Image (cartoon, helix red, strand yellow):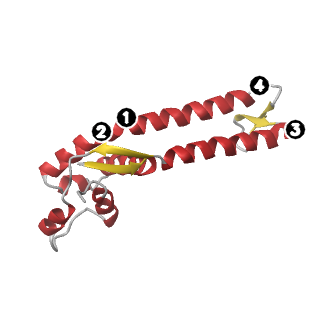
Amino acid sequence: MKKALTTLEVLNIGAWYKQARESEKKPLNSLPLKVQWILKKNMTVLNPIIENFTNLQKEAEDELRNNYISDEKSFADKDADGNDIRKIKDEYMSEFQDEVADMNSKLNDILMEVTEIEFSPIDVDKILDEIGDKETPLTVEDLEILELMKEE
């Protein structure tokens, strides 16, 4: 099944999956094994998109930081805890803020880009039918994320 998702939706699924795997409640373990397997396979499709955006964001931030780390545009200082930091000189602050805004705008544009993704579908309605009124560590947020992988 093909599904159109924004980069932001892909990142949200990735963050949710990571948190759900690390949670003490282990909500994913309450899903049928077949659904867990489908979800794992779907994540292998999403992971390269997540990794590409993360790398792009890091490169943009590093480039911006490197442009202002010089003694010409910034100076060494200490924070409230006594740690060494760099502060942008006042005469470069406006330029720096403009570049940060431009970087954020470009990253936001990428977050809104839509990609067609080949998923194995997850039947959320079937999961809900199987759970019924039983206690489950699954939350509404979990179901909302799984719903993104539902066949329409």
Q: Position of residue 129 (x, y in %)?
A: 14, 69
Name above or below for residue 152 compared with residue 109.
Answer: below
- Which residue is disc 4 drawn over? 70
- Judged by depth in the image, the label closer to the viewer, 3 or 2, is 2
Which mark is on residue 45?
2
Q: Is residue 67 above or below residue 151?
A: above
Report x, y in % for residue 19.
Answer: 36, 50
Which callout, 3 or 1, points at the residue further toward the start of the chain? Answer: 1
Question: Secondary structure under badge 4?
Answer: loop
Crowd rating for badge 4 (residues with CA inside 10 Å; few <14, some 14–19, many 20+): few
Q: In the image, which is nearer the foreground, mark 2 or mark 4?
A: 2
Q: Dot 3 lies on which element?
A: helix
Report the mark closest to the observer, 3 or 1.
Answer: 1
Say few, some or many: other residues with alpha carbon within 10 Å of mark 1 (under 14 / 14 to 19 / 20 or more): few
Displayed quadrant of residue 133: bottom left
Q: Residue 100 lies in what quarter of the image?
A: top right
Q: Which residue has dot 3 on it?
A: 91
Q: Could you give the CA–CA distance between mark 2 and mark 1, rounded to whole angstroms?
A: 7 Å
**Of the image marks 3 and 2, the number of the one nearer the N terminus:** 2
Label 2: state its secondary structure: helix
Q: Are marks 2 and 1 in contact (CB under 8 Å)?
A: yes
Query: Is 9 on the left-hand or right-hand side of 78?
Result: left
Q: Nearer the viewer, residue 151 or 83?
A: 151
Which quarter of the rendered picture does the C terminus lie within?
bottom left
Amino acid identity at mark 3: Glu
- Amino acid tagged 4: Ser
Near-viewer residue (29 or 125): 125
Residue tagged 1: 48
Whole-number angstrom distance, CA of label 4 to CA of label 1: 34 Å
123 sits left or right of 2 in the view: left
